[in-house]
Image (cartoon, rainbow, N blue to C red):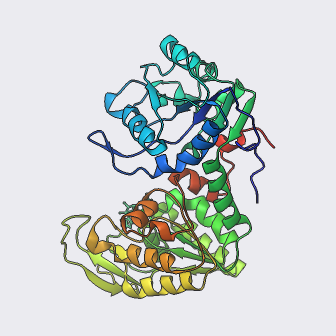
Amino acid sequence: MGLNKKSVDDINVNGKKVLVRCDFNVPLKEGKITDENRLVAALPTIKKLVADGGKIILCSHLGKPKGEPKPELSLAPVAVRLSELLGQEVKFVPSPVVVDDSVKAAVDAMKDGEIVLLENTRYRAEETKNGEAFSKDLASLADVFVNDAFGTAHRAHCSNVGVTQFIDTCAVGYLMQKEIDFLGNAVETPVRPFVAILGGAKVADKLNVISNLLEKCDTLIIGGGMAYTFQKAKGLEVGTSLVDDTKIDYCKEMMEKAEKLGKKLLLPIDTTIAKEFPTPIDAEIEVTSVDADAIPADMMGLDIGPKTAEMYADAVKSAKTVVWNGPMGVFENPILAKGTIAVARALAETDATTIIGGGDSAAAVNQLGFGDKMSHISTGGGASLEFLEGKELPGVAAANDK
Ligand code: AMP
């Protein structure tokens, strides 16, 4: 499934002002960028537009300043690091309202091939409400718009959707294309067997993903906190594990759906349990099966057990396409990370196409040093999940068709 949207290869930006919406929403600690994957992922599009002789005006949000300037969420450190990564100055043009006369003057003074970066778009309250005034302000800076921010593509905000109403030429960048190609091909035309792995805390966050992926994949693997609602739906004792009692019927439905479609739905057969969550870090843990009342009433499951890890790794080994979103346990605590590590290792070792949905699973894979072993690690957690639900992403839909 190719993306039928105009890309940066289909437009001519020579001598033109190009507003580029990037996803520079990087984690910061005391003003330092602690994970620069999203910056690195944005480079190909920026370099291409520079090489084509455009005047590049970069913009992004960072964190949640909630509509007012918050110095700790300024994009200033991003301008510094981007300049280093590109080997070319990225001039930061800050304004508490993102676009004002001084910013316009700086843009008017740009030469072809130069780059500026605007301040955090969420300094403006209209941004997340897709308000017209800010969309117009942004559009007033440029002749052409390029959206390369996959991480925000599931939101309709001024800087990725509203602005497209006031600029005629709106294309997507290379990162957006790559994300949609990988995720789209995996879901729509997977090389089979296609194994999808879902984990993380809550079933409720992944209802539509479970349902949609069951239709598309051959095997659906469930781990993490969400597995216990499935176990309870099977009538098993889950102790004090994370359970959403309002989703028991839903889990039953999904198990029936899998059966009807002839799909494998794999659930944990053993689990690592502890009395307290999530501390202490050296809590006493035990491994138990999940049979009947094997999990004591006063204990909770916090990771998949070793037999489950082996079973999941075997399923990965037999796959040709694997999509993974969500950790298998409370992987932030090293004693509860074994299941997540086992799954990450299985993905790292296979020749199959391996795609990691963003968020925690991407962080886990990178932390464990398996990042370069994966075919694709998405830069967008929420966006990749909504894509896997089969939803159209507003940020993609807003670009011109080819
Ligand atoms: P999500 O944001 O839905 O992908 O969930 C990620 C979070 O789920 C991580 O912070 C994990 O610590 C947490 N998690 C994974 N497994 C469990 C579990 N068995 N019980 C409670 N939380 C869990």
For the point 36% across and 36% down, which residue is it?
Answer: 77
- Ligand 1 is found in the corner quadrant, namely bottom left
| Quadrant where the N terminus is found in the figure | bottom right
Foreground pick, 354 / 9: 9
Q: Quadrant of residue 141?
A: top right
Q: Residue furthest top?
A: 101
Q: Pick the residue in front: 223 or 78.
A: 78
Query: Between 273 and 65, which is closer to the camera in this rendering?
Result: 65
Position of 239 with respect to 371 (left or right) is left
Q: Is residue 119 visible?
A: no
Q: Residue at x 26, y 41 (%)?
A: 30
x and y, in percent, of residue 278 in the image: 26, 64
Q: Position of residue 237 (x, y in %)?
A: 38, 79
Asked which quadrant contains residue 322, the reply is bottom right
Q: Is residue 226 above or below residue 164?
A: below
What is the count of numbered marks?
0
Residue 39 in sight: yes
Residue at coordinates 49% horizontally, 83% vertically from top-left?
313
- Residue 361 lies, with reference to residue 234, above or below; the image says above
Quadrant where the C terminus sits is top right
Snapshot quadrant of residue 288: bottom left
**Is 71 placed above or below 26 here?**
above
Counting from the top left corner in percent of width and height, residue 363 is at 41, 60
Q: Residue at x 55, y 43 (%)?
A: 152
